[in-house]
Image (spheres, grey):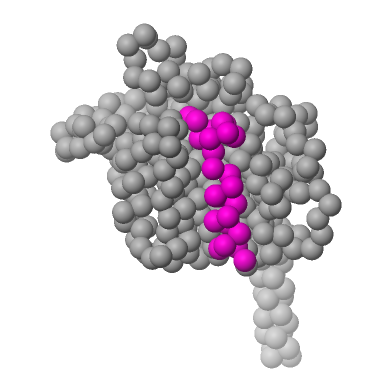
Amino acid sequence: MKKKLRTLGVVMAICLCVTENLFATDKNRDSMNEKLNLTQEWDKTFPLSEKVEHTKVTFHNRYGITLAADMYKPKGTTGKLPAIAVSGPFGAVKEQSSGLYAQTLAERGFLTIAFDPSFTGESGGEPHNVASSDINTEDFSAAVDFLSTRDDVDAERIGILGICGWGGFAINAAAIDTRIKATVASTMYDISRVTANGYFDVNDNADARYKIRQELNAQRTEDYRNGTYQRTVMNPKPADDAPQFMKDYYDYYKTKRGYHPRSINSGIGWNKTSSLAFINAPILAYSDEIRSAVLVVHGEKAHSRYFSEDAFKKLKGDNKKLLIVPGASHTDLYDNKEVIPFDKIETFYREYLK
């Protein structure tokens, strides 16, 4: 009798454990499907192409944050397609430059998604308007998760494309995620480098970085005390003697050309303390270990050209390419289809997403 009771007790314990595990699994599943309030109207800074099918989609990263994306699929296609995930610039939304890249590549036969990074645009994550070298790199891998499990995507032919600051995250993702077969970094910023050292590395010293840390940590205290986050002022109207690239940023983000109300760079602003972690997190530390193909694209006249050239020097292998676009500025590669080398980008993806 005692033996039967012990056996019954073990069975009940196992059942309870299984029930708890199932409940935990259901909870995890629910947390990975956060409901986002997605705009259904066409609110991009570029017209919808008649050559593609457009749909809104969502997917989650491994931190449980749900990301919003626009998916572009070439009309009339069947079977499994090569796919490309696109994001950037840093502080922009999918309705701007990344959507233009994604739609144009879809016109050329790729299934593409342009996504809002975690904590920005229509994507989830609170508080909004912050960035993370880890989480934002993960966002690219989460996009690969999503694409890899679609019936209309060939999981062995997935690439990524990062614009501006997201070019750096794309290269970092390629160093982590072996499923990524081809990476394009267009008009790239190394956000960790420019945050820690300033433009052209003019503040590349311990004292300058310590001062930045002091200021940002003091801001943390104020934010916590006030229960809110102080924001940066993004792209104010530049003075006549301001650097040309500041005028270029204003011309893109603050005019009809590229303005979007959800864009951090168009006016919302980053939370000031968002940049703190980048000082201690060099995102290209292991880029020399990337084995898959990488194409680095930059404008000849861009103030940021040194980011791409230095990043390219670290890459190894004969499947790494640097393309300097004659006469192009940094923001020319945001939306100027006469300048963006889409033919060469397509050729690169065709070669390495066979």
Check the image and report above or below for 354 versus 31: below
Above or below residue 213? Residue 314 is: below
Q: How far across and down, in percent of the image, does residue 325 sit?
A: 45, 40
Residue at (40% x, 39% y) in the render: 189
Residue at the front extreme of this rendering: 326
Task: Please tell me in which quadrant of the rendered image residue 280 appears.
Answer: top left
Residue 159 rendering spot, x and y as whole percentages: 57, 56
Residue lying farthest to the right in this orientation: 76
Magenta-drawn stretch contains 160: no
> Residue 26 falls in which quadrant of the image?
bottom right
Q: Please, is residue 316 above or below residue 268 in the view?
A: below
Asked whether, in this view, residue 38 is left or right of residue 140, the answer is right
For the question of whether residue 13 can be seen, the reply is: yes
142 or 343, which lies in front? 343
Residue at left 81%, top 55%? 77
Of residue 314 and residue 40, the one placed in the foreground of this image is 314
Q: Position of residue 40 (x, y in %)?
A: 78, 32
Q: Quadrant of residue 187?
A: top left
In magenta, the rendered stretch is 331-354
- Residue 348 among magenta residues: yes
Residue at 39% x, 36% y is 300
* Quadrant placement of the C terminus: bottom right
